[in-house]
């Protein structure tokens, strides 16, 4: 079994990005600048945003974190986005999801200028991805594809089963894996909560990509011997063994599945750090495009 080490791989990507930043500055460019908006005080969102800000520092980007109260109106949030859209110094903007219930996430995503949408969630960029045109790929699916590429996992002609059809992970990764390119050329089955006989389908997967958000949902009986398993899930579960009182679990029963498969991503340290690396890559691309 080979561990698809997202932490290690993302560190290499960050070194590559840092080198590109110094070249950009040598050519007379400026540091890439990422702005992040965090609404409310959701603990998990706070952790993710802080990790993104720290990653910016590591690669030599400028970052701006805008914190807004949980009860701010949609209008105020949209105005913040407008300000950032028209700020020429800022290359990329992300609004950390989920947002409080009274704010329409689609409206917010739609308000971000597509040229600054480094999360790749804007309908314009999703459309370009579907048409295989150059664009900002959504960061998590892009991170999965990059990990498969760097570990030279064979994907052509393989049966790829995706569990979960969210617009930010499951659906876009199903599109990328079915593209006529590498990684891609897989025969893809996209499954969801209404899927019948999921176990039978997952057992036929050469590549199993799981993004549903239920800790250890995928057991070893659901996995084919020798499969490549990508675990996107991150769920906080209570733990008496950690200082914080909780620990992170993936959607896959790692201890048992890892004994059976050929490749597997750990949680934490798999897809999560790759997502951040791809966000940085998109921001660099945006800064380069301006130059
Ligand atoms: P969503 O919560 O938006 O969607 C979950 C999907 O899982 C839905 O499509 C749902 O089906 C499907 N699902 C739920 N139950 C079942 C079931 N029993 N069998 C099959 N499918 C089921 O998911 P996200 O994609 O936003 O997140 C998934 C997980 O990935 C979460 O743990 C999240 O924290 C994590 N995540 C990790 C990231 C990273 O960087 N590592 C980035 C983004 C997310 P239906 O559509 O029918 O409701």
Image (tube, rainbow, N blue to C red):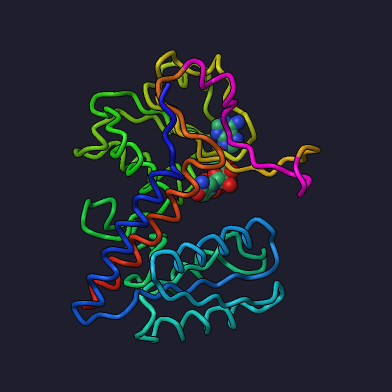
Judging depth in this view, the residue of 84 and 31 nearest the camera is 31
Q: Is residue 97 rendered magenta in the image?
A: no
Q: Quadrant of residue 18?
A: bottom left
What's the residue at 39%, 75% (across, down)? 33
**Looking at the image, how many numbered discs can be counted on the residues?**
0
Quadrant for the C terminus, please. bottom left
Decide whether residue 259 is among the magenta residues. Answer: yes
* Residue 106: percent from left, percent from top: 50, 64
Ligand 1 falls in which quarter? top right
Q: Is any part of residue 47 visible from this angle?
A: yes
- State the image quarter where residue 126 is shown: bottom left
Rendered location of residue 226, percent (x, y): 40, 16
Judging depth in this view, the residue of 129 and 271 nearest the camera is 271
Residue 156 percent across, percent down from the top left: 23, 28
Q: Is residue 51 above or below residue 92?
A: above
Image quadrant holding the N terminus, namely: top left
- Residue 193 visible in the snapshot: no
Of all residues, the one furthest to the right in this rendering is: 240
Residue at (44% x, 15% y) in the render: 224
Compared to 274, does 222 lie above or below?
above
Please provide the residue range marked out in magenta: 242-260
Write down the quadrant of residue 136 in the picture: bottom left
Q: In this view, does 3 lie above or below 38?
A: above
Q: List x then y, in percent, for residue 160.
A: 36, 28
**Which residue occupies 67% across, 68% down?**
102
Q: Which residue is drawn at 35% across and 74% down?
A: 32
Q: Does residue 236 appear left or right of residue 4 in this picture?
A: right
Q: Nearer the viewer, residue 164 or 17?
A: 17
């Amino acid at each position: 079994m080979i561990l698809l080490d997202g932490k290690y791989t993302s560190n290499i990507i960050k070194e590559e990005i840092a080198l590109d930043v110094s070249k950009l500055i040598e050519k007379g460019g400026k540091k890439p600048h990422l702005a992040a908006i965090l609404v409310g005080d959701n603990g998990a969102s706070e952790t993710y945003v802080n990790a993104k800000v720290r990653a910016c520092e590591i690669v030599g980007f400028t970052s701006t974190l805008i914190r807004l109260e949980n009860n701010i109106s949609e209008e105020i949030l949209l105005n913040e986005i407008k300000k950032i859209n028209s700020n020429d110094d800022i290359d990329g903007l992300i609004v950390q999801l989920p947002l409080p219930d009274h704010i329409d996430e689609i409206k917010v995503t739609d308000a971000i200028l597509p040229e600054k949408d480094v999360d790749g969630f804007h309908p314009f960029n999703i459309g370009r991805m579907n048409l295989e045109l150059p664009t900002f790929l959504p960061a998590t699916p892009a991170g999965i594809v990059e990990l498969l590429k760097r570990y030279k996992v064979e994907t052509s002609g393989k049966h790829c089963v995706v569990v979960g059809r969210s617009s930010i992970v499951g659906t876009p990764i199903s599109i990328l894996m079915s593209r006529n390119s590498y990684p891609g050329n897989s025969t893809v089955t996209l499954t969801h909560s209404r899927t019948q006989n999921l176990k039978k389908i997952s057992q036929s997967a050469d590549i199993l990509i799981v993004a549903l958000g239920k800790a250890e949902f995928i057991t070893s009986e659901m996995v084919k011997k020798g499969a490549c398993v990508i675990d996107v899930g991150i769920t906080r579960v209570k733990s008496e063994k950690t200082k914080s009182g909780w620990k992170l679990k993936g959607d896959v029963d790692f201890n048992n599945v890892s004994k059976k498969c050929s490749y597997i991503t750990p949680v934490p340290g798999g897809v999560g750090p790759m997502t951040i690396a791809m966000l940085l890559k998109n921001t660099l691309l945006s800064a380069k495009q301006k130059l």
